[in-house]
Image: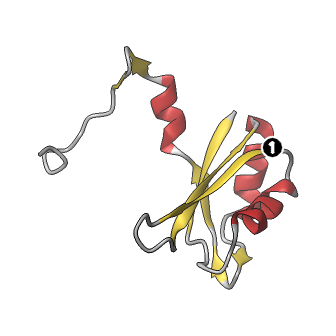
């Protein structure tokens, strides 16, 4: 399973419309657009999960394609890297100093 990061999603596009675009390349296991908790408006990005061969075809096929009047930016999510490099619930990703409180 591969998680796909999709950004520059039009605020008019629903999860079902996004899912339909990816289904042209194979079975979509999940599709989620991220919404602001306070305003309930789309943040313009989301995640789609597909099996790897189909996901790679979808990334090539949908990156730069217009959906809802905006060009999608589609790539492999960093979530895949994190999932492969977990140890005792912690990630090996280094945080920048500006990230630390």
Towards the viewer: 51 or 37: 37
Give the x, y percent position of residue 96: 19, 44
Place of residue 100 in the rendered image (x, y in percent of width and height, measured from the top left): 15, 44
Q: Residue at x 71, y 78 (%)?
A: 66
SS at mark 1 in the image: helix
| 25 relative to 7 in the view: left or right | right
State whether residue 64 is above or below residue 77: below
Task: Provide the residue designation for mark 1.
Answer: 54
* 27 shown above or below 43: above
Count how many numbered circles sit on residues in the image.
1
Horizontally, is 98 left or right of 34 in the view? left
Query: Which residue sits at x=50%, y=39%?
Result: 79
Q: Residues within 10 Å of mark 1 (few under 14, many from 20)?
A: some
Residue 55 vs residue 90, the one in the foreground: 90
Tell me which corner region of the image, top left, top right, bottom left or bottom right, holds residue 86: top left
Q: Position of residue 6 (x, y in %)?
A: 59, 60
Here the colouring is secondary structure
Image coordinates for residue 69, horizontal then vertical, percent: 68, 85
**Residue furthest top in the image:** 88
Is residue 99 found left or right of 84 in the rendered image?
left
25 on left or right of 52: right
Residue 61: image quadrant is: bottom right
């Amino acid at each position: 399973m591969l998680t796909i990061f999709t950004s520059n999603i039009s605020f008019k596009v629903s999860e079902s419309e996004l899912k339909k675009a990816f289904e042209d390349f194979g079975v979509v296991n999940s599709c989620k657009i991220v919404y602001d908790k306070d305003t309930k408006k789309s943040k313009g990005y989301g995640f789609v999960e597909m099996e790897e061969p189909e996901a790679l075809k979808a990334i090539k096929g949908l990156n730069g394609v217009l959906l809802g009047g905006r060009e999608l930016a589609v790539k492999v999510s960093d979530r895949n890297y994190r999932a492969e490099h977990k140890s005792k619930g912690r990630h090996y990703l280094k945080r920048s100093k500006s990230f630390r409180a």
